[in-house]
């Protein structure tokens, strides 16, 4: 069974969803990703969904959940590369993913994560040496 | 209903075409068909002549109950033509229906003249004639209605096509000037064109200008919120501009929460967008003339 790879770039994790998401795969991804955030001490998570053509409410909720879980583990989540049709579907489903940051592409997503980490870095000074 | 006798209407139409036509046009004039001036007497005569001829053909087929039968094809075509021209000329439905119904008077007079001595027969024949003309009249009104609906549909389509350009104001800044009322169909188109443009231009900020939107009610607000939410999912921030004082009041009175940055004018929104992208417009002092 296919597995969604989680790549590490610096202190960020990159997930690129290239296959059809079904519910079990989504649950496994949540599990895998939270484990990796802890083990890699990641500060940012980027989920690239540019290949995703079909979404349902479950996938929408999963994106929301991943963002919430990452926030608990003190990592910033950015969803990048959403297609217009997917965006419209999610809005029509009433899922505006208000807790999730979004960016147009991977490049802008990385900028956004950098900025978000810099903004919150000062408070408790959790900085990498 | 015609019972033992075959109806004499086909024979009547065939033999008295000219008399019937003359009396019918007379009765149409009496009911004021020419008064409004949209139709000339020549046109009226021509249409009436065509219909009488077509009715003759239809009656000859012997079918008086079902006017959708092939025998009445020609009559239906004539009626469709008449109602189409009436609809485009802006005549009322009653004026159009009167065209057919006014044929009753001369036709009944003719029936009385021929079979008036036999009351039962007269009643039967009148019944057949009146049913037939009622059906044809209703058909005319339907055709009239259909033409009007076609006109409305075409205008709606034109309205959709002429709306909603997405303008590139600056590198990374899009503007979407909305003109006219936002209904669901238009919102869909607006949303799609905005999102497509965000992808192709890589814009980070979209300014939605509602100066041209006459009223903002809960439905319009919901459509705006949806558009903003969809743009945000694509990674672009939205600013709503062009909120007129009355609209600001309406929004508050309705208790609406747009949940998005809003500015009074497009200029303010543009300035804010530039600031967010770390750009500035600089006043370089008086421009030297003549260079």
Image (cartoon, coloured by chain):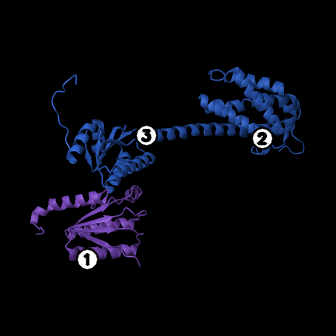
Q: Nearer the viewer, mark 3 or mark 1?
A: 1
Q: In the image shown, does A29 or B25 lie closer to the viewer?
A: A29
The picture's colour for chain A is purple
Q: Is residue A47 left or right of residue B140?
A: left
Q: In the image shown, does A83 or B137 lie closer to the viewer?
A: A83
Distance CA(mark 1)–CA(mark 2): 79 Å
Q: Residue at x 27, y 36 (%)?
A: B245
- Choose the circle earlier in sequence order: 3 or 2: 2
Q: In the image shown, does B28 or B18 lie closer to the viewer?
A: B18
- Vertical comparison of B84 with A117: above or below: above
Q: What's the chain of the residue with tag 1? A: A
Q: What's the chain of the residue with tag 3? A: B
Q: Nearer the viewer, mark 1 or mark 2?
A: 1
Name which quarter of the figure residue A111 lies in: bottom left
Number of marks present in the image shown: 3
Q: Is residue B66 left or right of residue B184?
A: right
Q: Which residue is mark 1?
A: A35
Q: What's the chain of the residue with tag 2? A: B
Residue A46 visible in the shown view: yes
Residue B91 visible in the shown view: no
Q: Residues within 10 Å of mark 2 (few under 14, many from 20)?
A: many
Q: Is residue B16 left or right of residue B242?
A: right
Residue B217 - label = none
Residue A78: x and y in percent read: 27, 62
Identify the secondary structure beneath mark 3: loop
Q: Residues within 10 Å of mark 3 (few under 14, many from 20)?
A: some
Residue B72 - label = 2
Distance CA(mark 3)–CA(mark 2): 44 Å
Residue B21: x and y in percent read: 79, 26
Q: Which residue is mark 3?
A: B163
Identify the secondary structure beneath mark 1: helix
Name which quarter of the figure residue B38 lies in: top right
């Amino acid at each position: 069974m296919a597995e969604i790879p989680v790549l590490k770039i610096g202190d960020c994790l990159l997930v690129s969803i290239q296959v059809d998401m079904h519910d079990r795969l989504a649950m496994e991804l949540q599990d895998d990703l939270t484990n990796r955030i802890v083990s890699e001490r990641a500060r940012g998570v980027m989920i690239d969904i540019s290949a995703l053509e079909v979404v349902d409410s479950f996938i929408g909720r999963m994106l929301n959940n991943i963002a919430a879980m990452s926030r608990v583990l003190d990592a910033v989540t950015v969803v990048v590369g959403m297609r217009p049709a997917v965006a419209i579907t999610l809005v029509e489903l009433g899922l505006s993913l208000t807790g999730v940051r979004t960016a147009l592409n991977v490049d802008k997503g990385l900028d956004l994560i950098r900025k978000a980490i810099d903004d919150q870095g000062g408070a408790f000074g959790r900085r990498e040496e | 209903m015609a019972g033992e006798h075959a109806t004499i209407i086909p024979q009547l139409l065939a033999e008295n075409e000219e008399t019937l036509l003359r009396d019918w046009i007379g009765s149409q004039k009496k009911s004021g068909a020419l008064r409004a001036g949209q139709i000339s007497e020549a046109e009226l005569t021509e249409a009436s002549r065509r219909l009488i001829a077509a009715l003759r053909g239809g009656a000859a087929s012997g079918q008086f109950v079902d006017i959708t039968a092939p025998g009445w094809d020609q009559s239906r075509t004539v009626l469709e033509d008449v109602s189409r021209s009436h609809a485009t000329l802006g005549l009322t439905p009653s004026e159009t229906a009167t065209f057919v119904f006014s044929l009753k008077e001369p036709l009944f007079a003719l029936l009385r003249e021929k079979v008036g001595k036999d009351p039962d027969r007269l009643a039967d024949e009148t019944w057949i004639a009146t049913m037939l003309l009622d059906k044809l009249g209703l058909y005319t009104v339907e055709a009239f209605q259909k033409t009007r609906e076609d006109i409305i549909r075409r205008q709606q389509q034109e309205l959709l096509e002429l709306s909603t350009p997405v303008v590139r104001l600056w590198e990374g800044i899009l503007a979407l000037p909305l003109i006219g009322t936002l209904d669901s169909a238009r919102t869909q188109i607006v949303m799609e064109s905005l999102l497509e443009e965000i992808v192709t231009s890589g814009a980070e900020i979209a300014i939605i200008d509602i100066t041209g939107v006459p009223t903002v009610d809960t439905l319009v607000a919901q459509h705006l919120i949806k558009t903003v939410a969809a743009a945000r999912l694509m990674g672009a921030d939205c600013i709503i501009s062009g909120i007129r004082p009355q609209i600001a009041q309406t929004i508050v009175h309705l208790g609406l929460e747009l949940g998005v940055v809003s500015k009074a004018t497009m200029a303010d929104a543009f300035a804010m967008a530039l600031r967010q992208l770390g750009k500035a417009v600089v006043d370089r002092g008086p421009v030297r003339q003549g260079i």
